[in-house]
Structure formats: structure tokens, C-alpha cells
Image: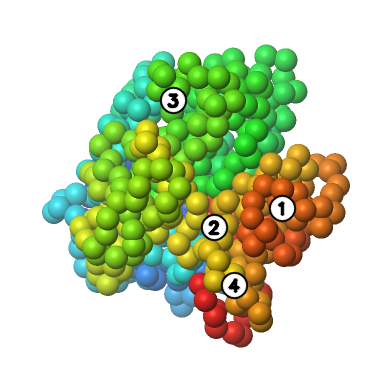
């Protein structure tokens, strides 16, 4: 690939949009772009054609790189046909590099001269996607941190199961390589295939988004020996059922840790890894702490502050009750958004990166997220944190997934709605779920409407897309409160 970039007269800072499934070629593309001082733009393969074109245009991609059949062909007119290209037959090492009609300006990057970088476009669950710049130093610092925090060694094998176009998985490319660890690639998510590959490759670590875990556990339980090599399963990006850490330990016999981070932070900011004292606690307490958002990772300065979204702020009390915004500093934090100085300035108010996430912090400096600032519901003057309601719903044995969001209410301004996916074979009335919540949280927090659905909409990284859930209810009207 490096020779192909050279032959195409790629210039330092040129953006290269990458279209690959999880595979060794994606691994090569990350390193080839950095080695050539280019900016790799990992592309979400789930985007519709207009969304894809908008990202390519905003990033000013000069080249398109990827697997034949996945790389769009815009032709001479510079507009992509609406029919999706079918995968082309070929060997496992087939890839192509073609020019893009969206090249814009010179190859300048907001990074040190001659330093390649990564350019990720966020999933946009609370607004339009923004281009997140991650420098070589960001990636190096994150690799150094995860090497230490997760105790990566050359004896480990990482399973690339979550999409490699997203940092939920891509961070491990650099960490596993730095450790000299093995890497196994699952080209598309299939729980049975994931378990089979993990067993065959001797996988020791992986990261799964919460929606993947139940199916993964079910598939593993069908194997008498489970996955004997697995030592650590990571997860993050959404609330998890309280019983899940225990089920992971019982089914897989491995450790579990909750993670928290953003694309802008390379990504990890916290882990729920237990210290020596916590590992010796009673089982119920230990598993409860595993389900928390966790403590700051090494090298991360993290505070929970009030007021949110302000350049001047103070720390909340470390009582696990007072809610504030999570703000961070450290070598893994993005230098800013691609060609968006106003958004960069807003994100770094007061010299700290504002995550937009709200949470509490306890005396052990462990945080617990309660909501995205933009997802908070204000109903009749009362503040409702959607994550708290989701956690209450997830305690019900019949509930597999839950998403809570605001819908318009003529009397209260906003009211609480929940979309719920049930466990396979489970049956429960919507009214019973609302009543179940009333025994666990205040009445004003309980969902007034519960919609039982077969599946929840997701972003390319696998996160629940609350924006898509809200839109039909708010179409044609302004939000009155939140």
C-alpha cells in the first residue's frame, strides 16, 4: 500500500477513505497511511450513499481505498450511482486504490509537519457528524496506557469483533501490535462464528458492544469448554443489565470490565477494573462495581464539574449523588475537529475537553454516568436522566435492551418514553414494565409510554441511535424544554 500511495503521488496530509470489512488489510491500511504521512478516514460501511458522500465531501478525501465491491465508484460525473455495488470475487488479499472526486485543498493537517493522522467522523447521535482528528501521538499515548492498564503481552490474542472502522475496536490495532500480540479478524458479526474463531485462535481479550454480549454468551454456552483462553471481556457504550457481569463470569470464566470513552479521546477514559481491595469484597458488591463506569485510566485527568458546558466550573461533591459534566485532559485527547474551529473552541472551554456526558463520582474516584447532556429529559420541571430509567428497566428479567428518551407533552413539556426489546421467548405487557419501574425509581421518572419493539436503531458503531427514536415525535415542532 505504501508503494501504491507513492505511485499515486499522495501528499502528506491527504485524506484516504478506507472501505474494508474487519480483516488483515484494514490492519495494513492503518499503518500504511501513518507511514506515508497520510490521514486515514475509516468509513462506516453501514452509511447510506448520501451519508457516505457527505462524509467524503466534508473530509475532502483525495483517495478511496478498500476491498473491491466496497469502494464506491463515482465515475466521471463525480456522483455515485444509487445501486450499491456487489462484492467482487477475488482473493483475500485483493484491494484497490482509486482517486476520489471530493479532494479539497492542499494536504494540510492540524498535526505536526510530516505526521500522519486519523480522521474519524462521529456517528452523530446528538447532531451532525463531526470530523475528529487523532494524531500519531494520541494513538501512541493510548497504546502505552492500554498496554499497562490491560496488561497486554506477546502471549495475548485480540479478537477484532466490533467494527474496525470505529475506535471501539481500532485502538487495539496499535496496542496489540506494540505488545507483539496475535490478532484475529471476524469480518462480520455472528455470535457463533465469533465463539468458534475465539476458540480456534486462542483469543485472550476482546471488546464487544453491549448488544453483542447476550448472543455471544448464548453461543459460548453451547460449547462444553466455552473459550478457555479468554481472560478479559471489555464492553462499553450503553448501560448493561445489572446481572450481566455475573453471567459473563459464570459463562466464560473470565474477567469483565466496563469501559467509557469517546472518539475524541482515542477512545478510553475509564475502566471498571477492580483493585486488590475490591476483588476481595463480597460477590454482589464486586459485581456492582464492575458495572460502574469506572476510574480514570492512567494518564487521564478527569473531573466531574458544575455547571456543565461552562468555561468556569467547580468539582461536584464526591458523594456519588451530585451530578456534573465529565471533563478531561491528557495526551490521548484530540487536538480538535476537522476544519471546525468554533466546535473545537466550544469543546475545550476552560482548557478541558467537555465530553457532554453527565455523571457522579464517589470517594474512590469511580464515576457513574447518568446521561448525555443532550438526552436529559425535563418533565414538569423535574430532571430525568434516561440512563437511570434504562437501568431500572434492564433489571426486569424479560428485558434485553432499553432506550429512554423524551417525547412532547402538552402539559409537562416533555414526558418519558421507553423503547424496549424483550429477551427471546419472553412476554410482558408494557403496563407491567412501567409498574416494575415504579418500585425502583420515583414516579416522575417512570416511562409514561413503553413501546415493545423487535429491535432498536443503531449507529455504525453499534450504539443505540436515540436521535432516530426521537425524530418522529418531534417532527415539525420545536423542543419546548430540553
> Against 434, is 175 above or below?
above
Could you tell whether 136 is left or right of 364 in the image?
left
The first of marks 3 and 4 along the sequence is 3
Q: Residue furthest left?
A: 113
| CB contact under 8 Å: marks 4 and 2 | no
Q: Which residue is mark 2?
A: 385
Q: Relative to 36, is 217 above or below? A: above
Disc 4 marks which residue?
380
Query: Which residue is found at the position 85% from the left and 54% from the top?
Result: 429
Kindly report the distance in space between the C-alpha atoms of the residues bearing marks 3 and 2: 26 Å
Of the residues under marks 4 and 2, which one precedes in the sequence? 4
Do the residues bearing badges 3 and 1 touch, measured as CB atoms within 8 Å? no
Secondary element under disc 1, as helix, strand or loop, is helix
What is the number of the mark on residue 438? 1
Mark 3 → mark 4, Cα distance in angstroms = 40 Å
Q: Nearer the viewer, mark 4 or mark 2?
A: 4
Marks 4 and 1, how far apart at CA: 18 Å
Point out the tag, 4 or 1, that comes first from the N-terminus.
Answer: 4
Answer few, some or many: residues within 10 Å of disc 4's Cα (few below 14, many 20 plus, some between 14 and 19): some
The colour style of the image is rainbow
Q: Provide the residue designation for mark 3.
A: 274
Report helix, strand or loop for mark 4.
Answer: loop
The mark that comes first in sequence, 2 or 1, is 2
| Residue at the image point whose x is 33% and y is 54% from the top | 305
Label whose residue precedes the other's in the sequence (3 or 1): 3
Amino acid at each position: 500500500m505504501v508503494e501504491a500511495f507513492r505511485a499515486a503521488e499522495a501528499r502528506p496530509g491527504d485524506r484516504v477513505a478506507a472501505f474494508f470489512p474487519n480483516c488483515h488489510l484494514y490492519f495494513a491500511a492503518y499503518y500504511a497511511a501513518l507511514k506515508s504521512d497520510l490521514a486515514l478516514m475509516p468509513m462506516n460501511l453501514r452509511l447510506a450513499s448520501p451519508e457516505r458522500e457527505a462524509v467524503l465531501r466534508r473530509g475532502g478525501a483525495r483517495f478511496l481505498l478498500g476491498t473491491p465491491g466496497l469502494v464506491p465508484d463515482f465515475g466521471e460525473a463525480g456522483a455515485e450511482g444509487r445501486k450499491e455495488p456487489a462484492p467482487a470475487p477475488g482473493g483475500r488479499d485483493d484491494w484497490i486504490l482509486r482517486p476520489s472526486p471530493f479532494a479539497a485543498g492542499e494536504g494540510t493537517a492540524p498535526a505536526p509537519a510530516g505526521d500522519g493522522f486519523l480522521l474519524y467522523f462521529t456517528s452523530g447521535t446528538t447532531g451532525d457528524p463531526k470530523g475528529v482528528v487523532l494524531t500519531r501521538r494520541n494513538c501512541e499515548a493510548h497504546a502505552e496506557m492500554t498496554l499497562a492498564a490491560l496488561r497486554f503481552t506477546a502471549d495475548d490474542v485480540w479478537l477484532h469483533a466490533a467494527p474496525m472502522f470505529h475506535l471501539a475496536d481500532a485502538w487495539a490495532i496499535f496496542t496489540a501490535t506494540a505488545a507483539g500480540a496475535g490478532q484475529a479478524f471476524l469480518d462480520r458479526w455472528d455470535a457463533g462464528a465469533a465463539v468458534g474463531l475465539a476458540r480456534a485462535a486462542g483469543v485472550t481479550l476482546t471488546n464487544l458492544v453491549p448488544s453483542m454480549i447476550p448472543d455471544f454468551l448464548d453461543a459460548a454456552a453451547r460449547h462444553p469448554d466455552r473459550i478457555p483462553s479468554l481472560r478479559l471481556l471489555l464492553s462499553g457504550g450503553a448501560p448493561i443489565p445489572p446481572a450481566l457481569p455475573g453471567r459473563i463470569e459464570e459463562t466464560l470464566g473470565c474477567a469483565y470490565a466496563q469501559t467509557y470513552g469517546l472518539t475524541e479521546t482515542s477512545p478510553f477514559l475509564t475502566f471498571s477494573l477492580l483493585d486488590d481491595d475490591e476483588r476481595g469484597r463480597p460477590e454482589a458488591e464486586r459485581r456492582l462495581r464492575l458495572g460502574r463506569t469506572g476510574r480514570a485510566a492512567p494518564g487521564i485527568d478527569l473531573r466531574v464539574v458544575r455547571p456543565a458546558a461552562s468555561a468556569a466550573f467547580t468539582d461536584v461533591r464526591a458523594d456519588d449523588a451530585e451530578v456534573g459534566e465529565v471533563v478531561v485532559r491528557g495526551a490521548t485527547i484530540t487536538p480538535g475537529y476537522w476544519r471546525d474551529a468554533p466546535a473545537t473552541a466550544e469543546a475545550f472551554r476552560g482548557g478541558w475537553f467537555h465530553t457532554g456526558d453527565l455523571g457522579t463520582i464517589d470517594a474512590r474516584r469511580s464515576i457513574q454516568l447518568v446521561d448525555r447532556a443532550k438526552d436529559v429529559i425535563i418533565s414538569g420541571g423535574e430532571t430525568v436522566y434516561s440512563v437511570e430509567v434504562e437501568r431500572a428497566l434492564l433489571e426486569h428479567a424479560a428485558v434485553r435492551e432499553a432506550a429512554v428518551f423524551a417525547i412532547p407533552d402538552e402539559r409537562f413539556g416533555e414526558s418519558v418514553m421507553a423503547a424496549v426489546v424483550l429477551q427471546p421467548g419472553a412476554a410482558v405487557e408494557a403496563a407491567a414494565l412501567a409498574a416494575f419501574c415504579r418500585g425502583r425509581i420515583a414516579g416522575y421518572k417512570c416511562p409514561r409510554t413503553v413501546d415493545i419493539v423487535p429491535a432498536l436503531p443503531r449507529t455504525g458503531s453499534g450504539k443505540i441511535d436515540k436521535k432516530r427514536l426521537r425524530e418522529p415525535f418531534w417532527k415539525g415542532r420545536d423542543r419546548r424544554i430540553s
